[in-house]
Amino acid sequence: MGRDAEESRFACNQCGEVFSRSSALALHLRWHGKKRHESDKAFPWSTSLMKHQRRLSGEKHFFCGECGKAFSCHSSLNVHHSSHMGERPYKCGACEKAFSCSSLLSMHRRVHTGERPYACGKCGKAFNQRTHLTRHLLIHTGEKLYKCGCGQAFTCHSSLAVHEKTHSGDKPFKCAECGKAFHSRARLTLHQRTHTGEKPFRCSDCGKAFSCHSYLLVHQRTHSSEKPFRCSECGKAFGSHSYLIVHQRVHTG
């Protein structure tokens, strides 16, 4: 290594970690000073303390050899490894589905129990995952943070990823029955129900069944008369976001 490169390395005198810039070292040293004050938790084992400190600092020292993804503790890396190895030791008692970690199983069980602990404060719609609520809230704020090069914007990254495939023509998910291909696995699953006739989402009020959960939600509002999607121009309200979009064209032309 050359002399200039050697001189550009800045080492921490507390833990030995080396940085390429003095500003990065200064930021790191602040963490050493803060870590004693930020955590008022008491841990019976030093390993638990180390894990907690890594969560505070954002340090991720455990790397997956398969894909390079990094984790703050070895146990999280082990759970991730299961996804590569195909191991799914956590089995659902209500169906045949299995998962690589217990938290995913707990989340899945809500499909069977109907539990939706995360409710929207604006319209009351509830979700079984916090991430789904976060994504839903963007409907009310109108934020579309994920933008395609063509100018179209989306409220979530997965929708952008599906949209980008319309430009590339990539449709990797093919129906085994008819050969029709789709941009996403979710679209394929929904399509496959046209062949099987499966309608797993049933209305508890009238017994009507639907192939898609979102169709059930829209239908249930016919019983409750709930219309959470309101036009900002004229105040007219609708039972589904798609109906609101169609209506807004009256104002925009």
Image: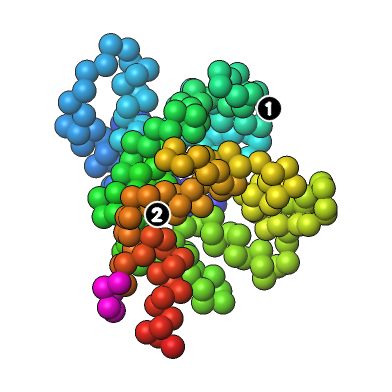
Residue 162 in percent (x, y) is at: 60, 60
Residue 61, percent from left and from top: 47, 33
Residue 117 vs 212, above or below: the answer is: above
Residue 85: assigned label: 1
Viewer-side residue, 222 vs 22 = 222
Residue at image position (68%, 27%) is 85
* Residue sticking out furthest to the top: 44
Residue highlighted by disc 2: 222
How many numbered markers are drawn? 2
Check disc 1 and give the amino acid type: Met
Q: Is residue 199 visible?
A: yes
Q: Earlier in the sequence, mark 1 or mark 2?
A: 1
Residue type at the position of mark 2: Thr
The quadrant holding residue 72 is: top left
Distance from label 1 to label 2 (Cα)?
Answer: 46 Å
Q: Main secondary structure of the magenta part?
A: loop
Neighbour class for label 2 at 10 Å: few (<14), some, many (≥20)? few
Asked if residue 16 can be seen in this view, the reply is no
User: Counting other residues with Cα less than 10 Å from the Cα at mark 1, is it few (<14), some (14-19), or many (20 or more)?
Assistant: few
- Start and end of the magenta stretch? 232-236
User: Who is closer to the viewer here, 138 or 33?
Assistant: 138
Q: Position of residue 28 (x, y in %)?
A: 31, 42
Q: Is residue 171 above or below residue 75?
A: below
The disc placed on residue 98 is none
Q: Identify the residue at horizontal 49%, vertical 48% (top origin).
A: 216
- For the C terminus, the image quarter is bottom left
